[in-house]
C-alpha cells in the first residue's frame, strides 16, 4: 500500500504525471515499432500505438512551462553558489537553451494548429536543436563533475578537514570517512544515470533534426521508442530516489 500511495502522490503532481505520460508514450512507440517490423498483420496496431497522441498531450502541457523555467533560471542566475566555474557556466548556458526551447516549440505548435502562419518545420528544428544543445551541455557537465568526484575519491586529502575525518571511521584504503565516501559514491551514481539519460535523449534529438545531420532520420520507430523508454525510466528512478524534485519538463 505504501508504494501505491507513493504512486498516487506522484501522479497528483504535474512533474510526476509528465514522467508517467512520457514513459508510457515511448513504451507505446517501442511496442508499436516492434509490431510494425513483424509484418503487415500487426502493422495497423503498431501504427496506432506509435501515433504519438501522448507526445502531443505533453507538447500542449508544456505551453505552460515557460514561467516555471523562468523562475528556475532566475533563481540560479549566474550560479554564484557553484564552486566550480566550468560547472557554473555550463549550467547557465544549459538554462538559457532550455528557456529558449519553450517559446520556439510553442511557435511550432501554433503553426501546426494554424494559429500562426509560419513554417512550423523551421521552428521544430530550432527547438530540437536547442534541446540537443541543452543535452550536450548536461552531458559535458556530468562528465566534468564525475572527473572531479573521482579525484576526490582517489585523493581525499584537502577535500575534508582533519576534524571531520577524525570524527568518523576511515576506509581501510583511504583516509576519507566512510560516510563521506558513501555520499560521493551516491553522487557518482546519480551523475552516471544523468549522463546515460541525456545520451539516450540526445540520440533521439539528432534523429529528429533535418536529414544530413549525423544519423538524422535513420532511426526506426522501435529504436526511438527504446531510447526514449530508457531515458524515461532512468528519470523516474532518479526522481523516486530523490523524492521527486520539481525540475523542468523533458521533451
Image (cartoon, rainbow, N blue to C red):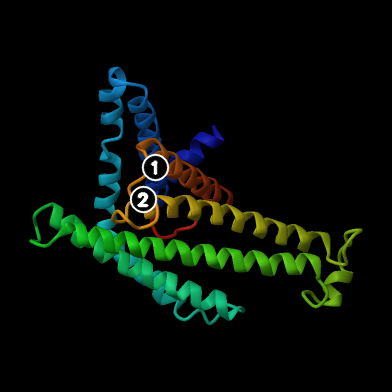
Measuring from the top left, give residue 209's x and y in whole percent.
32, 56
Task: Return the residue found at the far top.
Answer: 41
- In which quadrant of the rendered view does residue 110 lie? bottom left
Measuring from the top left, give residue 161's x and y in whole percent.
81, 77
Q: Nearer the viewer, residue 30 or 211?
A: 211
- In which quadrant of the rendered view does residue 212 lie? bottom left
Find numbered disc 1 in the image and state the secondary structure of the residue it sits on: helix
Residue of label 1: 224
| Crowd class of label 1 (few under 14; some 14 to 19; many from 20; radius 10 Å) | many
Residue 244 shows in the view = no
Q: Quadrant of the N terminus?
A: top right
Relative placement, left or right, of 161 versus 38 is: right
Q: Nearer the viewer, residue 82 or 143?
A: 143
Measuring from the top left, give residue 200's x and y in whole percent.
47, 50
Task: Return the residue found at the far front.
Answer: 212
Residue of label 2: 207
Circles 1, 2 touching at the beta carbon (< 8 Å): yes
Depicted 239 relative to depicted 130: above or below? above
Amino acid at each position: 500500500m505504501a508504494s501505491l500511495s507513493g504512486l498516487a502522490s506522484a501522479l497528483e503532481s504535474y512533474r510526476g504525471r509528465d514522467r508517467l505520460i512520457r514513459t508510457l508514450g515511448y513504451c507505446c512507440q517501442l511496442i508499436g515499432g516492434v509490431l510494425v517490423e513483424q509484418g503487415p498483420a500487426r502493422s495497423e496496431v503498431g501504427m496506432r500505438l506509435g501515433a504519438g497522441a501522448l507526445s502531443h498531450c505533453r507538447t500542449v502541457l508544456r505551453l505552460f512551462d515557460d514561467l516555471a523555467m523562468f523562475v528556475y533560471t532566475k533563481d540560479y542566475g549566474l550560479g554564484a553558489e557553484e564552486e566550480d566555474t566550468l560547472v557554473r557556466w555550463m549550467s547557465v548556458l544549459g538554462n538559457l537553451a532550455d528557456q529558449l526551447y519553450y517559446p520556439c516549440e510553442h511557435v511550432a505548435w501554433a503553426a501546426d494548429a494554424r494559429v500562426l502562419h509560419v513554417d512550423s518545420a523551421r521552428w521544430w528544428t530550432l527547438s530540437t536543436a536547442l534541446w540537443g544543445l541543452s543535452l550536450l551541455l548536461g552531458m559535458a557537465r556530468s562528465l566534468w563533475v564525475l572527473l572531479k568526484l573521482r579525484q576526490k575519491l582517489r585523493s581525499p586529502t584537502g577535500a575534508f578537514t582533519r576534524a571531520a575525518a577524525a570524527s568518523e571511521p576511515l576506509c581501510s584504503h583511504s583516509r576519507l570517512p566512510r560516510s563521506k565516501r558513501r555520499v560521493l559514491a551516491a553522487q557518482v551514481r546519480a551523475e552516471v544515470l544523468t549522463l546515460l539519460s541525456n545520451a539516450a535523449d540526445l540520440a533521439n534529438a539528432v534523429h529528429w533534426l533535418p536529414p544530413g545531420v549525423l544519423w538524422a532520420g535513420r532511426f526506426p520507430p522501435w529504436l526511438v521508442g527504446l531510447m526514449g523508454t530508457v531515458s524515461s525510466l532512468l528519470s523516474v528512478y532518479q526522481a523516486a530516489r530523490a523524492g521527486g524534485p520539481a525540475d523542468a519538463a523533458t521533451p
